[in-house]
C-alpha cells in the first residue's frame, strides 16, 4: 500500500492538466499512486493521459459531475491517505516526503495544511474551528483524508453539486472519532476560479441552515440567520445607492470581510 492516493477529477482541462500531473510525478515515486478520473473530455486530455499512462491510472467516461468522479477515485484508491487535486492545481515540491513523518498510521485522521492562491500568492488558512464552517470551508487541496473516514462518514453526497466537500468536511469535524491535525505548511498552489466560485448549489443553500443547526448547534444557527439578514440589508442598500457609488460600497464591504477573515486565519 502506498501512503498517498492522489486523485484528480478533470474535464476538458487541456494543457494545464499536464503541469498538475508533473507536480505529482515529481514527488518521491514510492510514496504515492496517481489516479485521474476524466469526465469524457473532448479536447486534448486523452492524448495527455495516454502520454503518462505508464505512471498513472485513469478512467475516461461521462459522469454526473466532479463529486461522482471523486467517488470513483475513492473506490479505485489503495493508499492510506486520499488527496484531491484539480486540473491547474500544483503540489508543492517534495511536500509528500515532508509530510510522511507527520501522518498517523493507525488512526482515522483528517490532516490539513495551507494552500496558496496562484494569482495573488495569498495563503489560506491557519487552523480551523468547528464554528468556522458556518461561513467557510477548507480547500480540498489542503486536506489528506485517512481512507477509513469514507467508511465511517460515507463518500461525497451527489445531491450537492458544488459544495459536497463542505458537507463532508463539516461531518468530519463533528465526529469525535476522527482526529483533526493541522500542519503549518503550504500543501499546494491552487488555481482558483473553480466551480465553487462560479456556480450555484441550490440544494446546498436550502440544506445549509439545517446542517448548521444539526451539527453546530442552535447558537451558530442563529448567527447564520444574522448573516443572512446582514447580506439582505447590504444588497437592499446597494440597490438604493446610485450606481456610481456602488463600487465604493462593495470595496468597503470587502475590506471589512477581509479584515475579519484575516483575524480568524492568523489567530492560531
Image: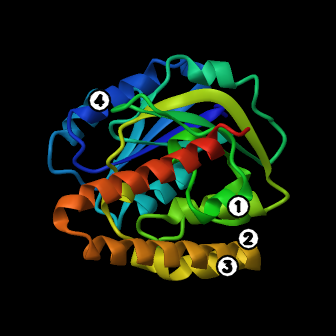
Q: Looking at the rendering, in which quadrant would you find the N terminus?
A: top right
CB under 8 Å between callouts 2 and 1?
A: yes
Disc 1: which residue? 131
Mark 1 neighbour class, 10 Å CA radius: few under 14, some 14 to 19, many 20 or more: some
Disc nearest the viewer among 1 and 4: 1
Disc nearest the viewer among 3 and 1: 3
Q: Which mark is residue 18?
A: 4
Residue 151 visible, this angle = no
Disc 3: which residue? 222
- In the rendered image, residue 224, in percent from the top left (x then y), is placed at 60, 74
Q: Nearer the viewer, residue 257 or 148?
A: 257
Secondary element at tag 1: helix
CB under 8 Å between callouts 3 and 4?
A: no
- In the rendered image, residue 53, in percent from the top left (x then y), is placed at 34, 31
- In the rendered image, residue 158, in percent from the top left (x then y), is placed at 47, 71
Mark 4 neighbour class, 10 Å CA radius: few under 14, some 14 to 19, many 20 or more: some
Q: Earlier in the sequence, mark 3 or mark 2?
A: 2
Residue sitting at x 33%, y 32%? 119
The answer to whether 32 is drawn above or below residue 196 in the figure is: above
In-image side of 213 versus 63 (left or right): right
The answer to whether 59 is drawn above or below residue 155 in the figure is: above
Disc nearest the viewer among 3 and 2: 3
Q: Earlier in the sequence, mark 2 or mark 1?
A: 1
In-image side of 240 versus 266 (left or right): left
Secondary element at tag 2: helix
Secondary element at tag 4: helix
Q: CA distance from mark 3 to mark 4?
A: 46 Å
Q: Earlier in the sequence, mark 1 or mark 4?
A: 4
Amino acid at each position: 500500500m502506498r501512503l498517498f492516493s492522489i486523485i484528480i477529477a478533470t474535464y476538458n482541462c487541456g494543457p494545464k492538466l499536464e503541469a498538475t500531473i508533473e507536480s505529482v510525478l515529481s514527488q518521491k515515486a514510492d510514496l504515492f499512486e496517481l489516479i485521474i478520473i476524466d469526465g469524457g473530455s473532448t479536447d486534448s486530455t486523452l492524448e495527455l493521459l495516454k502520454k503518462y499512462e505508464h505512471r498513472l491510472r485513469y478512467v475516461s467516461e461521462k459522469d454526473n459531475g466532479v463529486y461522482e468522479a471523486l467517488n470513483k477515485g475513492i473506490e479505485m484508491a489503495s493508499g492510506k491517505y486520499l488527496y484531491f487535486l484539480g486540473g491547474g492545481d500544483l503540489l508543492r515540491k517534495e511536500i509528500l516526503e515532508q509530510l510522511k513523518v507527520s501522518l498517523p498510521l493507525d488512526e482515522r485522521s483528517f490532516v490539513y495544511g495551507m494552500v496558496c492562491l496562484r494569482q495573488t500568492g495569498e495563503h489560506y488558512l491557519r487552523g480551523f474551528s468547528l464554528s468556522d464552517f458556518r461561513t467557510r470551508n477548507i480547500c480540498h487541496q489542503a486536506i489528506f483524508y485517512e481512507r477509513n473516514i469514507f467508511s465511517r462518514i460515507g463518500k461525497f453526497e451527489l445531491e450537492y453539486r458544488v459544495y459536497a466537500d463542505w458537507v463532508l468536511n463539516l461531518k468530519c469535524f463533528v465526529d469525535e472519532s476522527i482526529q483533526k491535525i493541522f500542519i503549518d505548511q503550504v500543501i499546494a498552489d491552487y488555481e482558483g476560479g473553480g466551480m465553487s466560485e462560479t456556480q450555484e448549489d441550490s440544494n446546498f443553500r436550502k440544506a445549509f441552515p439545517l446542517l448548521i443547526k444539526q451539527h453546530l448547534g442552535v447558537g451558530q444557527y442563529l448567527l447564520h440567520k444574522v448573516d443572512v439578514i446582514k447580506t439582505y440589508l447590504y444588497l437592499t442598500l446597494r440597490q438604493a445607492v446610485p450606481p456610481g457609488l456602488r463600487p465604493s460600497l462593495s470595496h468597503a464591504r470587502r475590506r471589512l470581510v477581509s479584515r475579519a477573515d484575516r483575524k480568524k486565519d492568523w489567530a492560531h
